[in-house]
Amino acid sequence: MKPHKKHHEPLLQQQQSNSELSIQSMHPLKHFIGNSDRNLSKPNSGGHNSTVPGLNLRNDSPEPFNPTNPTIIRVNGLIKCFGLNRVLDGIDMEVGRGEVVSLMGQSGGGKTTLLRCINLLEEPSEGVIEVEGEIVSSGGTSLKRKSRVALRQKVGMVFQNFNIFQHLTAVENVALPLLRVANLDQSEALRRSFELLDMVGLAQKALSMPPTLSGGQCQRVAIARALALRPIALLFDEPTSALDPESSQEVLNVMRELSRQGMTMIVSTHEVGFALEASDRVIFMDRGKILDSGSPDEVIRCPRTQRAKEFFGGYVRHGGPDLAGGSSFGTDVR
């Protein structure tokens, strides 16, 4: 006879001494799930013109990008050293409200470190970083701990390997920052969490545990969680690198729709198709420096530096799917 397995009790139902996560009942959520048929279990067949059912930032949506939009992230002279290794070497970059910037280049070139410095997950060694006019790091001195929490509410981050809690359901993962950081009441946290999952096509997976979800679904839960605190910008660290092509397409569809709705995004990626279609600008990095920056067409199809020509050469030489007139939304260059 098999030993009896302990039934998982959702975190939002548990009684906890600090009452931070003590939602009594999931019945309202089950009611919502029963009335929703939106999901993204398979990518739409409409190629790069397909849309994501239910995804709508509603009142959270900023204006679409315009070159005259104000700068919300500014980086000047950024240097980051790990011991004697200078990983970032004098980075200068500005990102306007609603702009989508793709960081491209060889693995190990500093793209991830740049994102982590913007969010102060890594301490910059030198240089200045500003977010909405506030200096968050200057000359190696950065915001104190409390202020970093506020910064990360403004600038969310989506990681390569999801970083969602395996012992929590999808909706609990999304609700966690709403309860612990935003201090929403329990019913509002539930409502908002379900709405966010619905936005990324996962309404019917709200009560699922991460081990039962595909990689693409886990990454979409992570995106919903990053959107929970209504950030002004999102940082994506190679969000499809750990995914199969089909799951990658699910995640890229959501990111493309966020781009259309005006979410400011800085994306470290090897997905040339995404960069060509969804980006306003591509920045090519190599060995901690920015070697090229401009429109996706300029940087990918007509690179100005020899190193960029070498990096994108295979794609251009073989006429990647997008150059041939089809969709290259998932094309990966490594």
Image (cartoon, rainbow, N blue to C red):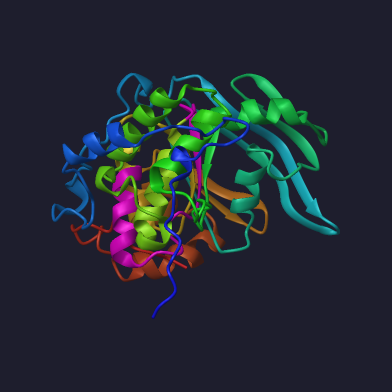
Nearest the viewer among 201 and 253 is 201
In the rendered image, which quarter contains the N terminus?
A: bottom left
| Residue 152 shown in magenta | no
Question: Residue 45 is drawn in which quadrant?
Answer: bottom left
**Percent of width and height locating residue 319:** 28, 66
Q: Is residue 302 visible?
A: no
* Magenta range: 229-255
**Percent of width and height locating residue 234:** 49, 37
| Number of callouts | 0
In this view, 190 is above or below 86: above
Question: Residue 106 is drawn in which quadrant?
Answer: bottom right
Q: Residue furthest right?
A: 84
Image point 40% across, 70% down: which residue?
A: 314
Q: Is residue 14 left or right of residue 224?
A: right
Nearest the viewer among 203 and 279 is 203
Question: Residue 144 is drawn in which quadrant?
Answer: top right
**Percent of width and height locating residue 256:** 31, 43
| Residue 250 shown in magenta | yes
Image point 31% across, 32% down: which residue?
A: 195
In this view, 141 is above or below 315: above
Q: Residue furthest front?
A: 1
Q: Residue furthest bottom?
A: 1
Image point 18% across, 57% down: which residue?
A: 325
**Percent of width and height locating residue 77:** 73, 37
Nearest the viewer among 215 and 9 is 9
Q: Is residue 206 left or right of residue 123?
A: left
Q: Is residue 248 visible?
A: yes
